[in-house]
Image: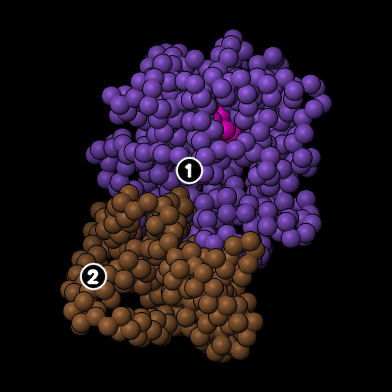
Chain colours: A purple, B brown
Amino acid sequence: MKRFSWILVFTLLLGSTWAPVGAYDYPIKDPYAATIAGTPTELEPSLPESIDYELLGLKVFPDRPMPDVFWYQREFLYTLSYQKQAAPLIFVIAGTGSSFYASSMIFLQKALWQAGFHVICLSSPTQMNFVTTASATCVPGNIREDTQDLYRVMTKAWEQVKGRIKVTDFYLTGYSLGASQSAFVSKLDEEKRVFNFKKVLMINPAVSLYTSARILDGMLLRIVPTQSPEEFDQWFKEILGGFGRIYKQMGQPPLDHDFLYDVYRHLLKTGVAPRQDNMAGMIGTVFRLASSNMIFSADVMANYGLIVPKNSELGSADSLTDYFKVTNRVSFIDYFNEFLVPYFQSKNPGLTKEALIESTSLRSIESYLRNSPKIVLMDNEDDLILAPEDLAFLKDVFGSRAKIYPYGGHLGNMTYTANIHYMIDVLKN
Amino acid sequence: MKRAMCLMLLTAFIFMAGCGTTPVRKEPEIPAKRPVSEHVKPDVTYAIDAFDPWEPMNRHIYNFNAIFDNYVFLPVVQAYEFVLPVFAQKGITNFFKNLTEVTNLTNSLLQFKFVKAVNTFGRICINTTVGIGGLIDVATLNDGIKREDEDFGQTLGFYGLGPGPYLVLPVLGPSSVRDTAGLAVDSLVYSMMMSQLIAELGMDDTNENILNYSLTGLYVIDKRHTEPFRYFKTGSPFEYDLIRRLYLIKRQFQIDN
């Protein structure tokens, strides 16, 4: 409690010196570079090198048969970092394709824990472990369904830990797609009332999942306009080649999705001035690899037959290399058109593509967002995943509950000291 | 003791191999909407491709390693981390790093990389004396002499030998035929040196053996303790493919430097 109030005082002090308009000093003004490079370490708040957390597992669907190829997916995994005393509990939802192991998630986990929260970190519903073990349909991307899945795991996780920790209030946050899902989860909670969230913080959300996916897919097209496998492959070879160069400094291969960014950060440091097209291509590649993992997992689990022949049963040691090559050529929009829409149409014959696009957009819950003072937004003027009308929508709907920074790209400034202070401040007051 | 371990591993393998048999199909297979046959050209080498003629066996061993890691290796390492204070863990890491400098030294010399050899020799001298038998890595302090990274696999690569087939070793993980041969040679040199050092202590045979085995066990635990890799943490169904490719790229980079 003492540390808690100390941090609060500290935050307020910093807030008072940094608050003046135009005093925002996040150093990277190019949105592409910001998205890739993130925040220089010396401008991040100082956090413990590591904190204690528990890796916990849930059998969400105990009777679900797991295909041999996913033999290692035994349960839904999440992490808990708790306070010894009574404290508020915050759920954090990761962005597209990311797990609680993503560096951004670990950063938020530490920052929120240090600020006095119990923290539960959840992988994105688009992440492989979530798709295989916790998604009711195993076909992610329909936010309404993903929200039900999230709410189910949140409820079960809370049941699992509530005997051990004392919780005063519930909070919710998420970044990128996780931010959009936070809004839908909050709305669902108004009906189900399990948590009754005190505050919900959305960090760089997608307004329309479809629009954001199209923007990100488009970034890869700037590098591989013909979408031929040879062209993508040439580009991918260059990226992998960069890995050799950073290996020595990193010590070990950090094989999450952030590792491509690390390659690029290294190039920046060594003075290779990256062209904006290349940076866009890098961001698009990261998104493509994340969605590839999701599409393959969904295809196998739902036995849909997009990439893997329908009714074939992949064994635990079967080669997946050729499927990797094919999956990398499927964009998120392809997935939306060839898999998501027909899949949900088969369950709900009247559904149109336009209706699905609409229902996965924040616009479909506009009045809820407009009239819920507990939901707040942190975003950037130059966020790459927003179309101009999306940003206008967010400003209009959230009004004074929106904190829009002038730079930062997509999540580049999330770990910047001023941003972290703002997040903790806005959650607590 | 060693033989019992080998037997245990072998049994586990056979068991694993048995698990992976093709399951019985219930319904006829329907070709995919985006079939491999249409989208992958057999005569093209893709970025993810690697020479892996023993892929099914390698994948079984990879899966075995993940299970072994989960149920045996990591629990032992966690117990080790729980029991020993951090400074002792660091001391042990440094101690073994100093002993394995012999690998860096011999292989730098074999590749005529004299600067690296001299640096390594300097590190051994400083760390063995000032660093109290290698427990403290004094040489690296204050931007001192960096540790080199050479092994016999790299030496073979230096003389033009390609990696050969990719190989996943039980417990040890990604390797290649060339690098496995290299590892065998490095281990032989290391164990010969260790026998000599232990003989210097003038103990009887039984105690010598106990010490030798204990040091080997501790070395293996320290190795896993300093290795952050965890199986299936990448969140990618294609983890095996990515690790394979990155391993080979990393090795080529090491050989070129």
Name the residue type under label 2: Leu
In this orientation, which residue lies closer to the viewer: A306 or B144? B144
Q: Residue at x 31, y 24 (%)?
A: A162
Q: Element under label 1?
A: loop
Can residue B175 be seen in this snapshot? yes
Q: Residues within 10 Å of mark 1 (few under 14, many from 20)?
A: few
Q: Mark 1 highlights which residue?
A: A50
Image x and y of residue A282, in percent: 67, 52
- Figure quadrant of residue B118: bottom right
Name the residue type under label 1: Ser
Instruction: For marks 1 and 2, give the CA distance.
Output: 34 Å
- Figure quadrant of residue B168: bottom left
Q: Is residue B171 left or right of residue A211?
A: left
Q: Residue at x 57, y 24 (%)?
A: A7
Asked whether disc 1 touches disc 2, contact meaning CB atoms under 8 Å apart, the reply is no
Residue bounds of the magenta highlight:
A172-179
Can residue A390 be seen in this snapshot? no
Q: Residue at x 65, y 49 (%)?
A: A284
Please check the rendered image and state whether residue A173 is part of the magenta-colored stretch, yes or no. yes
